[in-house]
Image (spheres, rainbow, N blue to C red):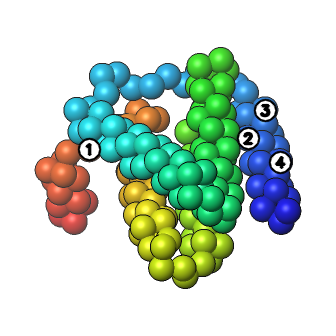
Amino acid sequence: MYLLIENLLFFIVATFFTVVVGWLWRNANPMILPKPLLGWYKIWFSTVQIGGIVLPLIVMLLWGVVWSYSSVLTVLLWYFIMLGLQILFESITLRQFQSVTWVMVPYLYLPYRIWQLYEGLTLVGSEPELIWVRNLLLLEIVLWTANYALDVSQLPRLFNWPIKDNSEVNINAEAEID
């Protein structure tokens, strides 16, 4: 029951925050994805889909449904619900509203997902039959943490911030010294 309350509370706060920030930034330029997508990004996106969706789905179906470990089913069901809500919010804010709030949606949901996975480690317990589930949860924490770092590193590209060549910075710094 507490997972329902925890997830519902997060969803309400994240939705409220997104709506308020969207309203405050309503006069910002419309947001569109930079094109073309980088080649490595397509590979990373595929990795996240396989590692973040396919593997947990297989584990949820096997351990949660087939082998009836209710703790695994509970942890991964809430994981997928919140992942689905994140994808929905990203889609709505980017495609329907073309709002700059699209960029902040992962910054709300990813830390919460990492928390869900960490919390899942304690909920799954230490039964020897669930070692693969615990390993998956650890792998997911690493995957989503790396994804968060990648998202942060892409902010300049998403907002089209000008990037100076290092040689220009060095020349300007030397000129200021003289």
> Which residue position holds label 2?
18
Residue type, label 1: Lys
> Which residue position holds label 4?
12
Q: Which circle's residue, 4 or 3, is located before the other in the chain?
A: 4
Q: Which circle's residue, 2 or 1, is located before the other in the chain?
A: 2
Mark 3 Cα within 10 Å, few/some/many (few <14, many 20+)? few
Residue type, label 2: Thr
Residue type, label 3: Trp
* Residue 158 coordinates in the image, percent (x, y): 44, 35
Q: Which circle's residue, 3 or 1, is located before the other in the chain?
A: 3
Kindly report the distance in space between the C-alpha atoms of the residues bearing marks 2 and 4: 10 Å
- Closer to viewer: mark 2 or mark 1: 2
* Residue 68 coordinates in the image, percent (x, y): 62, 59
- Closer to viewer: mark 4 or mark 3: 4
- Give the residue displayed 61% in from the left and 46% down from the top: 80
* Residue 105 coordinates in the image, percent (x, y): 62, 43
